[in-house]
Image (tube, rainbow, N blue to C red):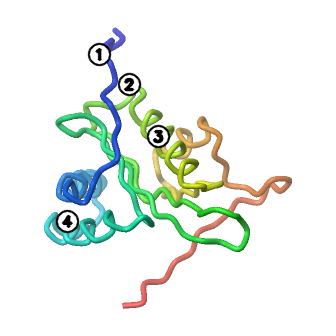
């Protein structure tokens, strides 16, 4: 049976909603067994980040059931900012209804509104359905004209 409940609205979160964003991010990490700072730590960081135009978050619903967190940076390769979709999360009970697609479309619209030309996403190798989700929405892990997969490397400097 198809759920005919309308999808909730998506809105930009202000710094005053940092705790809501933090709670959803902690829920996301705990669902997948990923170590995460506590809500209070993320709330403090998010309050600062969301007050700056280089980071934005989108929230879906009231009460909130989904979140997207995006960082913007400059790049020599593009006129406008490059966006990194740091996190996209929809609560388990709300999945497979199109809310992830709605959040992703809202991310793209906001990045365009801010002059951005590209959205980058890092997906875990065992990301379950995440790679298929992003590919279904036009994302790829190869450069145009090249079938060699792109890789992501990092090193914590602490």
Residue occupying the far top of the picture: 1
Report which residue position mark 1 lands on: 5
User: Disc 3 vs disc 4: Cβ atoms closer than 8 Å?
Assistant: no
Distance from the alpha carbon under mark 2 to that under mark 4? 28 Å
The mark that comes first in sequence, 3 or 1, is 1
Residue occupying image coordinates x 23% and y 56%: 30
- Distance Cα–Cα, label 4 vs label 1: 31 Å
Q: Are marks 2 and 4 in contact (CB under 8 Å)?
A: no
Q: Secondary structure at mark 1?
A: loop
Tell me the element at label 3. Answer: helix
Query: Does the residue at mark 2 contact the one at mark 3 (Cβ under 8 Å)?
Result: no
Residue hosting label 3? 106
First in sequence: mark 3 vs mark 4: 4
**Residue 111: x percent and y percent?**
53, 51
Task: Point out the tag, 2 or 1, that comes first from the N-terminus.
Answer: 1
Quadrant hosting residue 66: top left
Q: Note whether 5 is above or below 65 in the view shown.
A: above
Disc 2: which residue: 97
Q: Nearer the viewer, mark 3 or mark 1?
A: 3
Q: Earlier in the sequence, mark 4 or mark 1?
A: 1
- SS at circle 4: helix
Of label 2 and label 4, which has the lower sequence position? Answer: 4
Q: Circles 2 and 1: CB distance less than 8 Å?
A: yes
């Amino acid at each position: 049976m198809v759920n005919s409940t309308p999808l909730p609205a998506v809105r930009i979160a202000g710094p005053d909603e940092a705790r809501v964003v933090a709670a959803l991010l902690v829920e996301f990490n705990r669902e997948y067994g990923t170590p995460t700072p506590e809500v209070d730590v993320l709330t403090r960081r998010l309050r600062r980040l969301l007050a700056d135009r280089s980071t934005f978050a989108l929230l879906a619903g009231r009460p909130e059931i989904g979140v997207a967190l995006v960082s913007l940076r400059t790049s020599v390769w593009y006129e406008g900012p490059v966006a990194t979709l740091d996190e996209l999360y929809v609560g388990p009970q709300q999945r497979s209804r199109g809310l992830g697609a709605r959040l992703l479309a809202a991310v793209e619209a906001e990045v365009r509104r801010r002059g951005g030309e590209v959205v980058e996403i890092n997906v875990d190798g065992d990301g379950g359905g995440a790679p298929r989700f992003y590919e279904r929405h036009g994302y790829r892990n190869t450069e145009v004209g090249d079938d060699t997969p792109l890789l992501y490397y990092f090193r914590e400097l602490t």
